[in-house]
Image (cartoon, grey):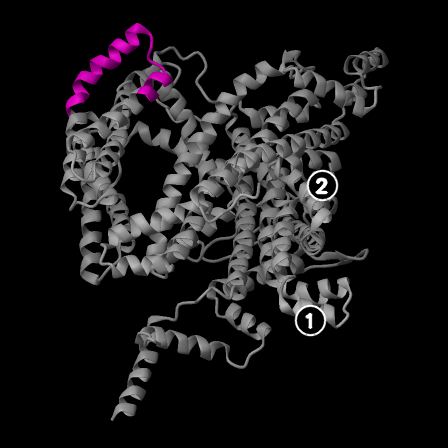
Amino acid sequence: MTSQPEPTEQAENAIELKAVEGKSQGKIVRERFFHHRGAIVALVALILVALLSLTSIGFPVFGWYVGGWWQYNPAETMALENAGGTPTLTMPWSEAGFAIGNHPFGQDTIGRDIFARTMKGVQTTMVIMVVVGAVATVIGVLVGALSGFFRGFTDTLLMRITDLFITMPLLVIGAVLGKLVGSASAVPLALVLGAITWTTLARLVRGEFLSLREREFVDAARVAGASNSRIIFKHILPNAMGVIIVTVTLLMSAAILLEAALSYLDFGIKEPTISLGRMISDYQSSFSTRPWLFWWPGMFIITIVLCINFIGDGLRDAFDPRQKRLPSARAMAKATRREHQSSSVATS
Amino acid sequence: MLTFIVRRVLIGIGILFVSSLIMYVLVDFTIDPLEDLRLSTDPSKDLQIEQRIELLNLNDPVLLRYLWWLGAFVTGDLGTAWTTGRDVADILAAAIVSTVQLVTAATVLAIFLGIAVGIVSALRQYTTFDYLITFLSFLLYSLPSFWIAVLLKQWGAIGYNDFLRDPVIAIPVILGIALVMGLVWSLAFGGDVRRRLTVGASAAGVTIAVLLYIQLTDWWSQPNIGPVLLAVSSLAIALGVTTLSSGLRNRRALYTSLTVAVLGIALWYPMQFGFYYLGAWGVMNWATALGLGVLAALVGAGVGLLFRGPDWRISARTGALTAVPVATLIFIDRVMQVWDDYMASNIIRGRPIATIGDRTPNLEGDFWVTTLDQYTHLLLPTISLMLLSFAGYTRYARGSMLEVMNQDYIRTARAKGLTERTVVMRHGFRNSLIPMATIVPIDIITLIGGAIITENIFNRPGMGQMFLRHLDENDIEPVMAYLIIVAFLAIVANIVADLIYAVLDPRIRVNA
């Protein structure tokens, strides 16, 4: 009673089989990810932005300061180069032709270089992103894993704690905690944000653990005498990696926006630390007179968050086994033709 | 089912208590009611500090103060804001209306637009339109909402108000808009080259015609709908609703919706008097307006019933679905009629789109003028609040529609020879709404959080503003009132989401 699948379906299956044959899980995922054009473009763009901000104004490493190639530092005040501090960056199609000049992104009212400040802001954003990601991963994975693996009382307790967090929009807890830490540096705020954003991750990891712990390979490991921690970390966790990576990526992009919003509302990062949200907040009233003060930080936030979201999307596609990437029309036509030829050869 | 609800409600109350305790302690740690006094140089500083400690019982441990607060709260006393001496209940009552208006408008718009766009995007999977929408939703998702709000303020309000002084769109701009519209519509409809070209050309043509009509009749200065536009759009609505709800082949449904549309057009003139008398009797308010809307839906359904037939349910539904937008159009038309008075008012001075507050202070006028005024204040905050959840709904609707359209029962439906409309609307669309139903309640909570920023930027005196201001002023009781309300709503939203899911999808068993 096997029905002959239609030729297009056959071709699709053939392409799919060819894409996975004889490859390890990691390799399949990597290949799928590298075939996601949007994600790759986003990854390259994100790396470029990070390199630009790190090399241009330098960065501190364990007390030393690695200098950058940019001539100004973010806090320096200078005489205005152009009237009103307009940017010296000119585009090829403008009258002056392409030029970068001394202050490509312009200067603010007291003459600080906006390029240097924006780059510093990007660094702050990156710090927040990494710290929030790390904190949320540790807490979320731990809570989710314990809850899903041990079930019963542990599960109930941990999930009730998680439930507490859904009673508040993140921005609200963030505002209260942001005022509490009221910090002039990024790390304490990021720690706090990490401590409130882990809940989604914990729920998803718990779900993953609940289903994975019933699988045969876990029974096999237990029969072989593996301890609980070994089963959790060596057997189940690697299988839940996909969910974790994707969720953490998306969580990091949300954290950047959260930080920006809090800094905008004055409950986040304070002077003298520079954050992109802070810059927009400081300069919003001058939007009609000095739009560059507003545009550049905004552009960098959007670029970073957009890149991370695209990377997250690419990762989700790469990890999701159900996700069938439809082959392009050309690939399908080619496969169908080949199928056709082989069948006509067989019949003749 | 009942056990399930009771259990969830009890757990919810428990969570609410614990959450309120934690938040009280946290807020108490955060705020410093003596902040202003510490910095003061007043010679009687110590005395004042002493008095304030006395006033707020600051010497008592925080848990004791929490219990006092809880005791008062349980008896319905929300406390007093010590900074202003006002009752928290009064502040809240004023603030809640503003926030509810904003959040409701944003939610409804986001759901409608987001689901529509998401479904179309799913039906055109991996086409240019799909990629375009995907990119757009990612972009909207990545925009900081305060950033977009500042832009809207600049371009939407100041820019548009400036434009209204001399409302002329240049011909090249009209052509550009027409080109874009043609492109978008042709991509959305898809199909072969000929179909695309036809759709694109007609969309571009319609756009040019509409823009020229607007230009020539000086519509920007005197926006109105009027009987002609009402007639055209009512008939279009009738056709559109019938196409989606039952297909034009269903004659009874088609006749129903056309009858309803004609009825609406015929009622336009009498309704002008109707609105006048309602105003004269002093009963023209939002409740009446809503009542009229419900009445319209009932009449529409009634017309459908009159056409009877074997599937009268479908005709009745189509009639009701047509009646509501037509009635809304008549209502909007009435609101638009006060535009001239509104613009000429010496408070507005020809700059209608507002950026601050939720109403114009000291504006004199009847129901229609205040409605228009609230609308012009609501416009920009709603857009900026909507964009984010619009992006979310688009993604969800697309994902869930794709999931459904790959199911076997869709193949079965197609194999039975059902029309594509029936397959998409009845088998696909309806089922794709099930997961959406659980997202909406939770998204509303996110929106209430997002409203904090929107209210802050547009200076709307809503709950978010209340929260921020009092948190900044170290005033705990209004802050707690806000937190409790939000927590309560979040818990209710979660229970509702679970219930909807269980009701809509019989495969889900609620574990009671």
> Any magenta on residue B359?
no
- Is residue B232 in view from this perspective? yes
Report in which chain the residue with disc 2 lies.
A
- Compared with B272, B421 (above or below) is below
Q: Helix or strand or loop: what does disc 1 sit on?
A: helix
Q: Nearer the viewer, mark 1 or mark 2?
A: 1
Where is residue B486, by image quadrant? top right
Q: Amino acid at mark 1?
A: Ala
Query: The C terminus of chain A is located in which quarter?
Result: bottom left
Residue at the image point whose x is 47% and y is 66% from the top: A37
Please provide percent x and percent y for residue A74.
67, 48
- Identify the residue under disc 1: A220
Residue A319 shows which numbered tag?
none
Image mark count: 2
Question: Is disc 1 surrounded by few (<14), some (14 to 19) or many (20+) residues within 10 Å?
Answer: few
x%, y% of residue A110?
64, 38
Quick check: B469 left or right of A232?
Answer: left
- Left or right of A23: which side holds B242? left
Q: Amino acid at mark 2?
A: Pro
Q: Please indicate whether residue A93 sits to the left or right of residue A199 in the image.
A: left
Q: Between A116 and A282, which is closer to the camera in this rendering?
A: A282
Report the magenta stretch's main SS: helix
Magenta range: B266-291
Name the residue tied to disc 2. A272
